[in-house]
Image (spheres, grey):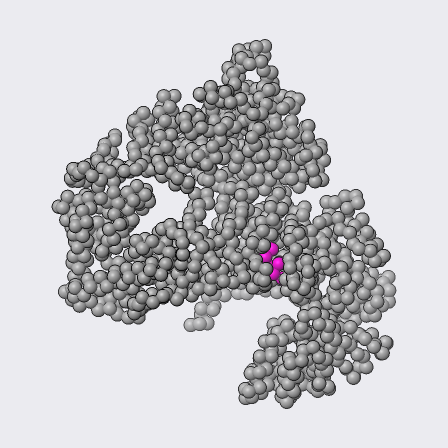
């Protein structure tokens, strides 16, 4: 019934897949990129230059391709940028790796690599490379960023302390972003629109919270209008709801509004109750009561100067009628997103019709500047002038375009830009390790068996310890992730990803801790650490060993050392050193941070810089593995500017630009970019780490098993199981 | 049981525009739209092979909505034109032809899309700024104090739709009606913000076009029997109207999510009917003369109201609700209980009317901003076409009210604009190429493609094998019949230019549109007296044409920029 087929998962297969994707993606990358037309199964057409969208639209079948696409979309979800670069970079990395394996077969290789090659053959060389990649990503990359690259960074803020945003640099940043995302005849206009929107919506003190709000509710904050030229797009002060008034009564002066989430008219019976009618008179009186009650509520609203009623449900005719009589405009059937947006802006909770009727003031009303119908291309919308109680000043974007597909593209790009800005305005913590006092020069092998916090589950019975422990975990989430990766690297054991995940975070049933008292000790360290964050911190635990045993797999990992790394606060350089007495080497952990708003000029500057410094680093490196990984990454990085400069000729061609840049770096001169525009360093950094993670994922696969089974049969089986 | 199915992989094609299939489909579409264009355009009959509705048309809105387009590139093109038409009503074919021409012309050049798109955009902004400028030589101000130019505008629209099958006399009649209907929607005492009323088009098929008419107020169609039952009202003052939006049929509406238990012997129907009759009594005591209901009125209530000499009309339908509210000044009543006195409205008078075989109940307003245009035509297809044309004309008049300018029609604007662009790119290329990396040669090539695309739009006005010329002074269009003898005496062969502004008695130089000419400066700034004297101009709506131009070029740019087509095969 089941037929299975297995294929060796190899770099070669992955490279083939990546090359196909690269061919598609590279045609729409950069300022010279072109559009791609996608059709949906419903027959709609969509224009896109968004790499993520394109990859998803392809509905790829190949398992490795699907995995790559998954990686890209999860990267996009976070950062909103870099899908196309992701593919190109990944493809170049794979090419680099593939070239090395080819070279390895060459008998005329130098001895060093040959021995290394034999070594790989013996113990699953790809896994070693993937480990080396991870080591690079977690320990070396941050250091290079901090020590070398950071001197080239520019800031988007005109003054770093107050973080005042410089309009011209934001314009440059957005223009460069939209260059790669929308059609080239519109990118200037759209980036100007975004810039205007940004400055109109933000108050001087508004922070990250505004990004969050706009990001969450972007769909509600823009209106698409087809049939008009793109240049008719504009920003409108206030909020535009994609609904018409059920009843509109013009009003001015002191206007208040209420939000309701249920029908105002009382009903005969509510859910779960029973209403017994004994006589006709009873029916009539109850109907009369309902009517009078509705009338009274609406009158009461009127007396409180309420001129606008916003409802998430359909209101009965009676309510609409009395609203109209009392001069109240009504907007019905709003989506829950629209209601939550309005509530977030004005901080208003829904109005509940009072049970016992009183003349007192209604608490849940808010002032409105204006509320009027807005006609866009003969369709009517509700235009609200809300008075914001948060840092966001409500503005809506009206996006025009000849076809819906184009409007969607612009909406998508604007949303992506918001995500990109949101990331840019965050600080980035860099944690890395340098080897100081390497007395034991000969032992170039990097021994680092033990790292990881003791996220060890205490005795299940010991509830009192467990609780504070978990609290700490939540706070040190980043550190936890790091531990996870450390473990992957250094455990020297083949543990698939999934297992690791269940294994690490305090999953009590699968773990049987042998030493519980240690945990308590670690705990105190952690809490201690929280109190004096800027102080030096010496790991207290030496030569303790904890043995975990996972029941299902019979895998034993022993920890000789336990140490706690912690997340440091922004801006503070905090070397945390950890002495490993066994090895005789001493490594120091450096933590630093990249301030929010770091940018670099566009046109492959980041890639060329990183390439240059990586090569320098590789020369200094002692370990061949590290050297090789650095070299591969450095060379793959150049692939991106190569694509960007593809159409340029003469002085602006890639080789010229590259030589100029390298020369400038060698002579310590400032880099001169031929293009205007800026890009976020944060975005590039995140892209790099995402690609490296994706690559390690690919490399750890040794076999792809195709299961030929119809999906609905799986469903059948499931339902049978349930029975 | 839900079925999970694996998604089929999509089909991905590169460089879609270069494939033969796309080229042929594009040229087929171009042939269809080109042959429809203009007053002598050919009609298209669209029908389904399985029978049913047959549509004879030459209008882009009808044509494109009936065509079934499958190729994604063509879909982009047709939807963008449909979207343009639904917002401006006019200039759909112009947009379609220009877009197709531009794509075809530019592709022949083989320049990179970046250059093409950039330069197209520059040329477009050049056109737009010229058409909006004071010195523009092809637009005239619209004077609302006389009907002349407005009539020209409406007449031009009617004559450009041959599928309406109107004679000259009928065209005059219908254009006068359309203008009257439009003028009736303008409120008399408008201060500041004008809110236009509405003209409702009432179908009357199978009658002569000459029988069409415009009436102020609203016509409600009724059967003769119903109409006989209504008693005539004799009243000197205005009639009081109550308009219900809720049902008066005695249904028990929403009772909530719980259950309602009715004891044996209790008749809710009677209870509700009692309530309705109470409502009737209130209406009587409020001296209401006319009760209108969107939904159904219970027969007992209806009879009760009739007994008290109140006219009750139900099943008005939701479409008439808004005009009725506007005209009578009522507020739609949603309550069966007490009615607020200020929710009643009024009409001046009511009467019955018979047009053709149809009977109507006619509500005559106090102040008219709502009117009914009774439109007649011989058969269904011609009527449909005429209705669309009337809607277009009414919309164009509204747009003209907002932006009181009109463009010279008959192809003169296009040739004039092409002459202007040629001159501008030839004599002043630096101002266009300010900050760009494009060369002058590239600009010349694209400008030539652009101008010839504009000119071939007007070239498609001619369907009978005639020739098209342009003069070297105004840059207007002149057409000459197919079997004209020789080139010797143009002034005798040509009588008037396309728009009718100039005649051939002036000392002009002509040349064929397709031949190459030296770029010349078309005369800008129209002489005022020339506009005043001409009564029979062909005019186009400025707003619609401007947007059409923009949409055509934006869409062409969009299509030229495509590098891949990914088709989802699910």
Quadrant of the image for the C terminus of chain A?
bottom left
Q: Residue at x 14, y 49 (%)?
A: B304
Of A24 and B94, the residue lying toward us:
B94
The picture places residue A455, in percent across and down from the top left corner, at 63, 80
The picture places residue B409, in percent across and down from the top left corner, at 50, 26
The picture places residue A190, in percent across and down from the top left corner, at 59, 48
The picture places residue A263, in percent across and down from the top left corner, at 33, 61
Q: Residue furthest front?
A: A253
Q: Main secondary structure of the magenta part?
A: helix
Of B458 and A428, the residue lying toward us:
A428
Q: Which residues are magenta?
A: A417-423
Of A550 and B472, the residue lying toward us:
B472
> In the image, is residue B440 part of the stretch drawn in magenta?
no
Q: Residue at x 27, y 53 (%)?
A: B334
Judged left or right of residue A173, residue A661 is right
Q: Is residue A145 visible?
A: yes
Q: Residue at x 81, y 79 (%)?
A: A585
- Count of number-bearing discs: 0
Q: Residue at x 72, y 45 (%)?
A: A647
Q: Is residue A373 above or below residue B537?
A: below
> In the image, is residue A419 part of the stretch drawn in magenta?
yes
Judged left or right of residue A588, residue B232 is left
């Amino acid at each position: 019934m089941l037929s299975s087929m297995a294929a060796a998962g190899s770099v070669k297969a992955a490279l083939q897949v990546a090359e196909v994707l690269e061919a598609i993606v590279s045609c729409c990358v950069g300022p010279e990129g072109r559009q791609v037309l996608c059709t949906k199964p419903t027959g709609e057409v969509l224009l896109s230059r968004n790499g993520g969208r394109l990859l998803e639209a392809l509905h790829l079948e190949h398992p490795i391709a699907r995995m790559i696409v998954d990686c890209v979309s999860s990267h996009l979800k976070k950062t909103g940028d870099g899908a196309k670069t992701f593919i190109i970079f990944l493809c170049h990395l794979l090419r680099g790796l593939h070239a090395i394996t080819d070279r390895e077969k060459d008998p005329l290789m130098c001895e060093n690599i040959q021995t290394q090659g034999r070594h790989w053959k013996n113990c699953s060389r790809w896994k070693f490379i993937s480990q080396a990649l991870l080591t690079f990503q977690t320990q070396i990359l941050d250091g290079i960023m901090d020590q070398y690259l950071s001197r080239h960074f520019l800031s988007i803020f005109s003054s770093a302390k107050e973080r005042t945003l410089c309009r011209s640099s934001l314009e440059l940043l957005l223009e460069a972003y939209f260059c790669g995302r929308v059609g080239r005849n519109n990118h200037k206009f759209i980036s100007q629109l975004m810039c205007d929107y940004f400055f109109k919506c933000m108050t001087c003190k508004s922070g990250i919270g505004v990004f969050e709000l706009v990001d969450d509710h972007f769909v509600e904050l823009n209106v698409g209008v087809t049939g008009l030229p793109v240049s008719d797009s504009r920003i409108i002060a206030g909020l535009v709801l994609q609904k018409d008034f059920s009843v509109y009564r013009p009003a001015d002066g002191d206007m208040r509004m209420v939000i309701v989430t249920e029908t105002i008219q009382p009903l005969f019976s509510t859910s779960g109750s029973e209403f017994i009618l004994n006589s006709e008179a009873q029916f009539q009186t109850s109907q009369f009561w309902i009517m009078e009650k509705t009338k009274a509520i609406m009158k009461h609203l009127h007396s409180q100067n309420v001129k606008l009623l916003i409802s998430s449900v359909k209101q009965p005719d009676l309510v609409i009628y009395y609203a109209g009589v009392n001069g109240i405009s009504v907007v019905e059937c709003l989506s829950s997103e629209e209601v939550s947006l309005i509530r977030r802006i004005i901080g208003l909770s829904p109005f509940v019709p009072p049970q016992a009727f009183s003349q007192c003031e209604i608490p849940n009303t808010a002032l409105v500047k204006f509320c009027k119908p807005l006609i866009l291309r003969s369709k009517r919308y509700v235009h609200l002038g809300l008075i914001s109680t948060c840092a966001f000043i409500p503005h809506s974007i009206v996006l025009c375009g000849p076809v819906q597909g184009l409007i969607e593209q612009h909406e998508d790009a604007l949303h992506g830009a918001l995500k990109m800005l949101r990331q840019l305005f965050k600080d980035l913590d860099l944690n890395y390790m340098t080897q100081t006092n390497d007395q034991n020069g000969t032992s170039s092998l990097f021994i680092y068996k033990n790292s990881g916090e003791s996220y060890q589950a205490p005795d299940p019975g010991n509830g009192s310890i467990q609780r504070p422990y978990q609290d700490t975990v939540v706070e040190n989430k980043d550190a936890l992730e790091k531990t996870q990766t450390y473990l992957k690297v250094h455990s020297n054991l083949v543990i698939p990803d999934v297992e690791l995940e269940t294994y690490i975070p305090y999953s009590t049933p699968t773990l049987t801790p042998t030493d519980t008292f240690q945990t308590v000790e670690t705990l105190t360290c952690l809490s201690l650490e929280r109190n004096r964050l800027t102080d030096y911190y010496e790991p207290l635990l030496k030569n303790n060993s904890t043995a975990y045993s996972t029941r299902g797999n019979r895998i034993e990992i022993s920890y000789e050392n336990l140490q706690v790394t912690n997340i440091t606060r922004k801006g503070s350089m905090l070397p945390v050193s950890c002495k490993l007495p066994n090895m005789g080497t001493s490594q120091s952990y450096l933590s630093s941070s990249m301030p929010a708003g770091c940018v670099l000029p566009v046109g492959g500057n980041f890639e060329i810089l990183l390439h240059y410094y990586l090569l320098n680093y590789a020369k200094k490196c002692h370990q061949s593995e590290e050297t090789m990984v650095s070299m591969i990454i450095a060379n793959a990085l150049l692939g991106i500017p190569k694509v960007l400069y593809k159409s340029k000729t003469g002085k602006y061609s890639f080789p010229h630009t590259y030589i100029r840049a390298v020369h400038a770096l060698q002579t310590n001169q400032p880099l001169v970019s031929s293009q205007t525009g800026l890009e976020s360093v944060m975005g590039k950094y995140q892209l790099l780490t995402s690609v490296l993670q994706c690559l390690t994922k690919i490399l750890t696969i040794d076999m792809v098993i195709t299961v030929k089974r119809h999906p609905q049969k799986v469903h059948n089986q499931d339902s049978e199981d349930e029975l | 049981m839900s079925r999970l199915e694996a998604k089929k992989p999509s089909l991905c094609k590169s460089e879609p525009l270069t494939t033969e299939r796309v080229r042929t489909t594009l040229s087929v579409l171009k042939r269809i739209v080109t042959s429809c264009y203009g007053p002598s355009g050919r009609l298209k009959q669209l029908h389904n092979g399985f029978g049913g509705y047959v549509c004879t048309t030459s209008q882009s809105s009808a044509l494109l909505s009936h065509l079934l387009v499958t190729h994604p590139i063509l879909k982009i093109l047709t939807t963008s034109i449909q979207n343009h038409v639904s917002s401006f009503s006019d200039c759909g074919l112009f947009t379609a032809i220009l877009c197709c021409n531009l794509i075809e012309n530019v592709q022949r050049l083989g320049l990179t899309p970046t250059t093409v798109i950039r330069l197209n955009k520059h040329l477009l902004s050049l056109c737009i700024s010229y058409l909006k400028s004071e010195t523009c030589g092809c637009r005239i101000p619209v004077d609302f104090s006389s009907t002349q130019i407005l009539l020209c505008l409406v007449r031009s629209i009617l004559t450009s739709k041959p599928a309406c099958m109107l004679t000259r006399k009928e065209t005059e009649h219908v254009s006068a009606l359309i203008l009257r209907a439009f003028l009736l929607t303008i409120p008399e005492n408008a201060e500041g913000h004008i809110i236009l009323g509405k003209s409702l088009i009432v179908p009357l098929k199978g009658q002569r076009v000459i029988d069409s008419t415009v009436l102020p107020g609203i016509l409600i169609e009724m059967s003769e029997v119903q109409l006989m039952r209504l008693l005539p009202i004799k009243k000197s003052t205005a009639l009081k109207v109550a308009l219900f939006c809720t049902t008066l049929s005695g249904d028990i509406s929403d009772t909530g999510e719980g259950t309602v238990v009715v004891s044996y012997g209790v008749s809710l129907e009677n209870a509700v009917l009692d309530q309705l009759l109470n409502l009737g009594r209130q209406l009587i005591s409020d001296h209401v003369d006319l009760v209108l209901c969107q939904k159904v009125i219970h027969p007992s209530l209806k009879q009760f109201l009739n007994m008290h000499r109140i006219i009750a009309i139900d099943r008005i339908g939701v479409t008439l609700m808004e005009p009725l509210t506007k005209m009578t000044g009522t507020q739609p009543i949603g309550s069966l209980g007490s009615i607020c006195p200020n929710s009643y409205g009024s009409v001046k008078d009511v009467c019955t009317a018979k047009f053709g075989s149809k009977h109507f109940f006619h509500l005559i307003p106090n102040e008219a901003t709502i009117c009914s245009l009774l439109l007649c035509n011989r058969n269904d297809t011609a009527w449909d076409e005429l209705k669309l044309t009337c809607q277009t004309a009414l919309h164009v008049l509204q747009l003209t009210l907002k932006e009181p300018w009109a463009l010279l029609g008959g192809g003169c604007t296009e040739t004039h604009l092409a002459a202007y662009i040629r001159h501008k790119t030839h004599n002043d290329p630096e101002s266009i190429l300010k900050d760009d990396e494009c060369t002058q040669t590239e600009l010349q090539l694209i400008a030539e493609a652009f101008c010839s695309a504009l000119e071939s739009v007007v070239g498609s006005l001619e369907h009978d094998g005639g020739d098209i010329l342009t003069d070297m002074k105004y840059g207007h269009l002149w057409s000459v019949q197919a079997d004209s003898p020789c080139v010797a005496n143009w002034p005798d062969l040509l009588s008037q230019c396309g728009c009718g502004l100039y005649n051939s008695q002036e000392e002009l130089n002509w040349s064929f549109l397709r031949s190459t000419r030296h770029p010349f400066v078309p005369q800008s700034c129209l002489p005022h007296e020339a506009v005043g004297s001409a009564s029979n101009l062909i005019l186009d709506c400025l707003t619609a044409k401007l947007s059409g131009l923009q949409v055509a070029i934006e869409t062409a740019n969009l299509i030229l920029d495509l590098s891949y087509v990914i088709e989802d095969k699910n």
